Image: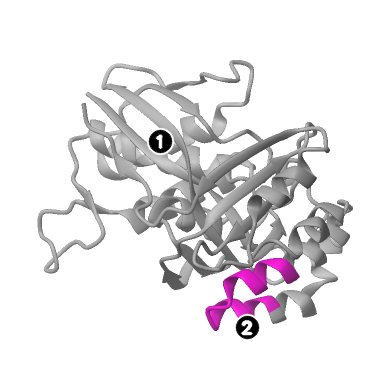
Amino acid sequence: MEGRAAALGAGTVLNALATGTGAAFGIDVETRATVTLDPDANGVDGRISEAPDADTALIERCVALATERWGDGEGGAVRTDSDVPLAAGLKSSSAAANATVLATCDALGLTVGDEAGDADPAVDVTRIEACRLGVRAAREAGVTVTGAFDDATASMLGGVTVTDNGADELRSREAVDWDVLVWSPPERAYSADADVARCEAVAPMADLVTDLALDGRYAEAMTVNGLAFSAALGFDADPAVEAMSHATGVSLSGTGPSVVAVADPTDPDTDLDAVADAWGERPGTLRETTTRNDGAAVSGE
């Protein structure tokens, strides 16, 4: 009873800490999970390949909840490996949770799809159901303040998603095709440690970002978000300012510390190489990638 799956990292359009409404977009970096189930196992043993000493409570809880819901409470083991850096604002927890839940479904022999019931009787578990279960696991493991349904849906479904994180409801989803540049400084920031009160203080700006996002003006939304939440969370806004004249949009991603710039490849006025030149003078790492609209999937053999 072994299953495999992969899920996307993501960047931020709107941080949900201020109002409970959030928005994010899937990017072409992945976390992969392998789940082995054993009916005789006592509990779940987790391992994060690139960080052997990291906390594995989230992925272990994902397996436990998935087998409780769709299996017979089997235990076993889960291993993840990832291109998404931990605690960098690129939704590593959401990607790990989504990949683990889907891999568990694969190990249970379940078919995962986007519609179930009369719409597609062959589908046993929908991706949005799997996404909500991963969000529940993240809350129970204490790795998120908001539940991160925005991050989780972007990772699971791809494209840009706008969500109500209090109700775990998807308000909108749309495909986007952007080139993406990510700068991740050496330090790390954990979402559960974010200063929620300071984020709530910028709620009027978050309301403006929500309006822009629901109007499809995602790049403008993320730029406003980046300035507001950099100030609220105590991050330097200079990297975003350096990118503004060359990018379609730029934002602090999540609760930081990464900054993500996007460019519409059809816009001749964008130049992510110029942004890379500016950011390359700063300590840390640069990653060039793209958006993705396909989302998470079972990997199979």
Q: Position of residue 277 (x, y in %)?
A: 75, 43
Is most of the magenta stretch helix, strand or loop? helix
Determine the image quadrant of residue 107: top left
* Residue that carries the numbered disc 1 in the rendered image: 100
Foreground: disc 2 or disc 1? 2
Let me know if residue 26 is in the magenta part.
no
Q: Is residue 211 magenta?
A: yes
In percent of width and height, residue 227 lies at: 81, 65
Which residue is at a point 33% across and 35% down the rendered structure image? 5
Q: Residue furthest front?
A: 268
Q: Quadrant of residue 71?
A: top left
Q: Which residue is mark 2?
A: 211
Q: Which mark is residue 170?
A: none
The kind of residue tagged 2 is: Asp
Asked which secondary structure carries label 2, the reply is helix
Magenta segment: 209-224
Mark 1 is surrounded, within 10 Å at the Cα level, by few (under 14), some (14 to 19) or many (20 or more) other residues, namely: many
Give the quarter of the figure containing the C terminus. top left
Residue 235 in view of the camera: yes
Q: Nearer the viewer, residue 240 or 168?
A: 240
Secondary structure type for disc 1: helix
Give residue 161's position: percent from left, percent from top: 49, 66
The answer to whether residue 287 is left or right of residue 241 is left
Mark-to-mark CA distance, 2 and 1: 33 Å
In primary-sequence order, the first of circles 2 and 1 is: 1
Q: Nearer the viewer, residue 71 or 220?
A: 220
